[in-house]
Amino acid sequence: MARKLPPKDVVIVGLGWTGSIAAYELAEAGLDVVAIERGPWRDTATDYAPNFAQDELRYRIRHELFLRPDQTTFTFRNKMSDTALPIRTWGAFMPPNGVGGGGVHWNGETWRFLPSDFVLKSHLKQRYGERLLPKDMTIQDWGVTYEELEPHYDRFEYLCGTSGTAGNLRGQIQPGGNPYEGARSRPYPNPAQLQPFSHTLFAKAASELGYKPFPQPSGNMSREYRNPLGVRLGPCTYCGFCEWFGCANYSKASPQTTILPVLVRKPNFQARDNCEVIRINKDPAGKRATGVTFVDTQGEQWEQPADLVIVAAYTIFNVQLLLLSGIGTAYDPVANRGVIGRNFTHQTISDVTSFFDKSKFVFNPFIASGSIGTCIDEFNGDNFDHGPHGFVGGGYMGQVQTNGRPIETTPVPPGTPRWGAKWKQQVRDNYLSALKPGTGVHGSMYSYRDVYVDLDPDYRDRHDRPLVRITMDFHDNELAQNRFLTDKFAEIFRAMGAQQVVKEYRNGPYDITKYQTTHLCGGAVMGTDPHTSALNRYLQSWDIPNLFVMGASAFPQNAGYNPTGTVAALAYWSLDAIRNRYLKEPGPLVHA
């Protein structure tokens, strides 16, 4: 029997980027807010001190900042006819754990999706008709436009102190920026980071091939910055320990360095860490959320009543919580009905490794930051004519070499032994003169009828709840897209003067053991039709109006960018509607 706590105005599940933004906005509105986080409290000064923060073995290899599979895991299969088995070691993605969520370990790539990404299905049908869209593809429009989200993208970028070069300022294309981006209302708050040698060499070669390279927008500070909340961040020191690591220098935007220092001082905000929400509670009619039930570290259950429930956990946990709570109809891929678990996606990532003459090229890969890079966008989204190529979708690509850490930065030419004296010799000879970007090709993954998540019928977690089952495989469309982009990417390295370029295509079947990104998306998607979406355009549940679900779980499909900027923009968009409309008149913001 759960012990009942005093009621709150708002309970938030998860205290990462979206949870922190939601808590701040609603506490600022005068509401009594509690956030419940599964993992531990994490703070920059104590958890990422400079004397141990740059520990590759602890954080990159042993996954200090991530959920442990013995805490909870998922089952996986490629096809519905396969038997799903538990994931015992994280590979393709890394579920975050603790206050700050994925905002602690991310690299800081702060992209805006293209305007056409938000109206994807209608845009592609209008340009190409139905001929290019596979019959089992389930892409759909989001129900919100880039123009509606632009002020909220801008707000997040200024919260983070994003470093970048504007490419489209109020409709005017700007030199040095991304000419394909949607119009922005003002420049980035900070100039782009300085680019090392390999990145400038990539820019030169790309320009000579007719492309328009630009510096990657970065949550790593190019200079000292004070954000609109008064929180100060320091300039990046280019240490090369961003992805998988917390930033000890206060120079990478994260909840800890941008918003939590202000939020935790609010008397009407409370955080409960090391507590796992296991259920969203409903009234007897099932039409209203009454709060949540969570379990503490002693295994004791508590009920937290609240008038407003916001689910803001990692993508797959948002979906799991809805399924376990019986909210919305679980997706049935055979009947093609239901919405919870539908339109689940990941990303198609690939790379090339390029070997240069060591007597002429010294790249010093250890001089790096999480988002440092030079990119091109000619082959992203629908920026190019897909008709001749027979696929849809795309991605950005760039020389985005974010580190030269010694354990994992060991590029060697094909044919090198995997160990021994010859391997060591090749590592030594190529460390400074080979290039292996972290995610050189960052491609979209569109949604399909047979890619989804549901509850596993056989395996259960430590709370005796069914595990989430992932059914996922790459389709021909994504494999053709990846091969096309990878070939284009390799051409630039040849133009840079590489002696040897080794392509590393993303091949099928989907491999759960090989890391891609942590960008799982979908499963509780937004839209305009309750038959194909779990949430309306304001991220409000169609079924329970005092329940909002925030995060990448709302994406109807995944675009060719990192999702964090769009996750935050959607959160601000939703919270604007909550503050200015819902709180004045609680109820559905959109009527089905």
Image: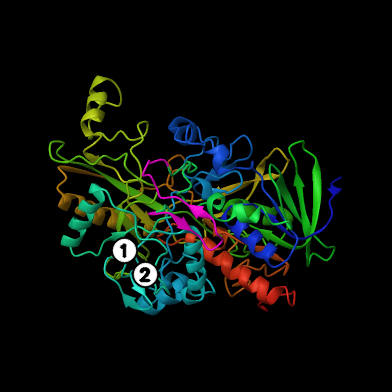
Which image quarter holds the N terminus? Answer: top right
Which image quarter holds the C terminus? Answer: bottom right
The 10 Å Cα crowd at callout 1, few under 14, some 14 to 19, many 20 or more, is: many
Q: Residue at x 46, y 39 (%)?
A: 513
Vertically, is 172 above or below 263?
below
From the image, state whether disc 1 or disc 2 is nearer to you: 2
Q: Is residue 318 visible?
A: yes
Q: Position of residue 71 (x, y in %)?
A: 64, 37
Vertically, is 398 above or below 379?
above
Vertically, is 26 above or below 497?
below
Q: Are marks 1 and 2 in contact (CB under 8 Å)?
A: yes
In the image, is residue 90 part of the stretch drawn in magenta?
no
Number of numbered tags placed on the structure image: 2
The kind of residue on which mark 2 rests is: Glu
Q: Is residue 319 visible?
A: no
Q: Would you name the residue on which mark 1 appears? A: 377
Q: Would you name the residue on which mark 2 appears? A: 181
Q: Is 228 on the left-hand or right-hand side of 426? A: right
The kind of residue on which mark 1 rests is: Asp
Q: Position of residue 504 (x, y in %)?
A: 30, 45
Q: Nearer the viewer, residue 388 or 236?
A: 236
The 10 Å Cα crowd at callout 2, few under 14, some 14 to 19, many 20 or more, is: many
Q: From which residue to which does the magenta span run?
A: 222-241
User: What secondary structure is found at the residue carrying circle 1?
Assistant: loop
What is the C-alpha distance between the residues marked 1 and 2? 9 Å
Mark sitting earlier along the chain (1/2): 2
